[in-house]
Image: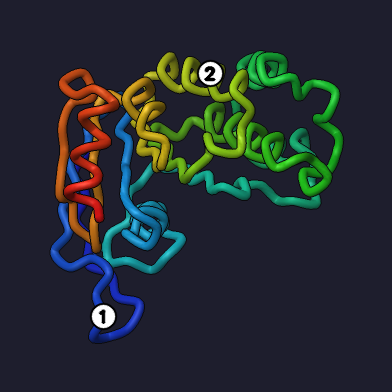
Amino acid sequence: MVYKCNFFYKKNKPVFSNFFLDIPDGKITALCGHNGAGKTTLLKCMSGILPSETVVQNTWFVGISGSLISHFSLEQNLKLIKHDISAARRYMEDFGLTEFVKRPVKKLSTGQQILSSLIVALVSGREILLLDEILSPLDPVNQEKTIKILKESKKTVLITSHDLNTVCELSDKVLILKKGQIVYENDASNITPEELKEKYKVLAC
């Protein structure tokens, strides 16, 4: 998937100027970078949440606070979309959410809200998932389950993370973003977490 973008918060302050992104279809790409580098803004531009000139079709965005109607339950949110019912039930069981499906999302824990949002994203039929820092609030067991499920989904995934060890474990491709530009990219299989940390220190700071 190729994405081009120009985005300005203010007229004379471009966040992305002639920005170009190329990520592999059906693979997981991890986007790293310092706070304020533009990671969340990029995902929101791609999904159409922010009014950029180019929007990627067939996407689903999940942020750190989830992506569901908070006063609806997971069950009610699922009813709003056409979805694979058996897959949804399987994911609910995997994430231990079966007993919470009727509880309003806003009354779930932060981790449960993210997992509920991820379930809806996975069964929505959208082929491109834009995931913003969804792993950091999860406990280690659910992090591991999420990584496994994302890998098995064969969807095109762009995920932001500050955990460089997890980035190397999860992704097929690694990108580093700095001040609205990609300053590094590599296949995850070509770099160790230690090497990525050194690259990050030099390029992202």
Instruction: In the rendered view, tell whether residue 90 sits above or below residue 34.
Output: above
Q: How would you rate the neighbour count of disc 2 (Cα within 10 Å): few for under 14, some for 14-19, many for 20 or more?
A: some
Percent across and percent down for residue 205 are: 25, 55
- Compare residues 46 and 203 and report the one nearer the observer: 203
Relative to 70, 30 lies left or right: left
Which dot marks residue 144? 2
Percent across and percent down for residue 127 are: 39, 32
For mark 1, what is the residue? 13
Instruction: In the rendered view, tell whether residue 176 sits above or below residue 82.
Output: below
Q: Secondary structure at mark 1?
A: strand
Relative to 113, 49 lies left or right: left
> In the image, what residue occupies the spot 80% across and 52% down?
71
- Compare residues 128 and 157 and report the one nearer the observer: 157
Residue 94 found in image quarter: top right
Q: Secondary structure at mark 2?
A: helix
How many marks overall? Answer: 2
Relative to 53, 119 lies left or right: right
Quadrant of the image for the N terminus? Answer: top left
Instruction: In the rendered view, tell whether residue 92 sits above or below residue 67.
Output: above
> In the image, what residue occupies the spot 43% across and 14% down?
152
Q: Amino acid at mark 2?
A: Glu
Percent across and percent down for residue 49 are: 46, 60
Q: Nearer the viewer, mark 1 or mark 2?
A: 2
